[in-house]
Amino acid sequence: MPGLDFERPIIELEKKIQELRNFIAEKKIDLSSELRRLEEKLEQLKINTYSNLTAWQRVQLARHPQRPYTLDYINMLMSDFIEIHGDRSFADDPAIVCGFAKLDEERIVVIGHQKGRDTKENLRRNFGCAHPEGYRKALRVMQLAEKFSLPLIIFIDTPGAYPGIGAEERGQAQAIALNLRQMAQITTPIIATVIGEGGSGGALGIGVADKVLVLENAYYSVISPEGCAAILWKNATKAPQAAEALKLTAQDLLKLGLIDEVILEPLGGAHRDPQKTAQNLKIALLKYLKELKAQTKEALLKARYKKFRNMGRVE
């Protein structure tokens, strides 16, 4: 498993432990006490490391190449997934996946950004950076959810919307703005979860929800730390300082009242135990689905409007 810079001591100790296990198995020597001592040292090192992460380190974990993506959560959490393609105007955008599914016995509609695991898939999915047709496809599927009175489950994981010339020519800003307006009016429960990167309008374009959840090592921000550093300091290497200033971690967002819950991850990040992360997320999703479905459409829209109007106040 590839590691990040701050994880190197952990990875080196894990290698030593594995080498000792192999040596014990090969030589048939009882070194259980030494093995136990190293395992205890490893556990304490993990606790010390992951309990004191900086904002920049959490950004790095949010971008980890083995972190679970939208389709991984769909496979782990849901059944009977039927994907819907195309915006009925220009094309299909693989950077956003949409479809019908079941969460336990609950019929739902699911939407989410999707990155790739290798170069070929990343190019096809544009590294999770959606084009206007991706946001139009998402809106089309949201309207289907409303038509059939199905709750919306949304997974956010993007560095931002694609800023290329073609995307701008096809109305990127308008597509996102339209989604913001329409999501505020959709009369079915919406739960959005930031599972990795939550970058700028690209994230918010499918992020107007009754409940907004963020995984423990995900981030949600108006701009990437590198982009912020390039603007403020004219130097992208200042990204760690920018990450601290942006207050983009799940813990900061909860304190600021911008999100509803932080979903805990296993020690070391979601990629170390995807099933456990998915189970934690499922518990929260089912809890909020039950709560939101009990509300009338009028109460749902009123609460959603109030939720976003209350953001950004400074005392």
Image (cartoon, grey):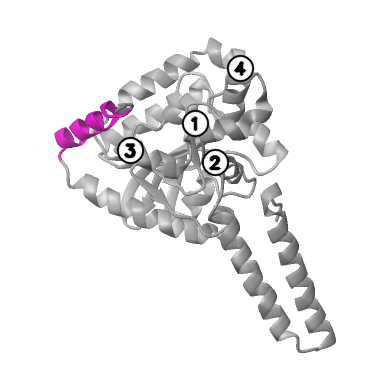
Among the two numbered marks 1 and 4 on one chain, the one whose residue lies closer to the N terminus: 4
- Label 1, on which residue? 246
Q: Residue at x 53, y 50 (%)?
A: 72
In the image, the segment drawn in magenta is 296-311
Residue 257: mark: 3
What is the C-alpha distance between the residues marked 2 and 1?
Answer: 9 Å
Please name the amino acid that badge 4 sits on.
Gly
Q: Is residue 88 magenta?
A: no
Please name whichever residue, 174 or 94, is drawn nearer the observer in this view of the structure.
Answer: 174
Q: Are marks 2 and 1 in contact (CB under 8 Å)?
A: yes
Query: Crowdedness of circle 2 by 10 Å Cα count: few (<14), some, many (20+)?
Result: many
On the picture, is 308 further left or further right than 121? left
Q: Is residue 307 magenta?
A: yes
Q: Residue at x 58, y 59 (%)?
A: 48
Query: Crowdedness of circle 1 by 10 Å Cα count: few (<14), some, many (20+)?
Result: some
Please name the amino acid that badge 1 sits on.
Leu
Q: Residue at x 44, y 48 (%)?
A: 81
What is the C-alpha distance between the residues marked 1 and 4?
Answer: 25 Å
Q: Residue at x 70, y 52 (%)?
A: 3
Please name the amino acid that badge 3 sits on.
Gly
Q: Are marks 1 and 3 in contact (CB under 8 Å)?
A: no
- The outermost residue toward the right is 27
In this rendering, which labeled residue sits more in front, label 1 or label 4?
A: 1
- Label 4, on which residue? 164
What is the C-alpha distance between the residues marked 2 and 3?
Answer: 18 Å
Q: Is residue 14 visible?
A: yes
Query: Crowdedness of circle 4 by 10 Å Cα count: few (<14), some, many (20+)?
Result: few
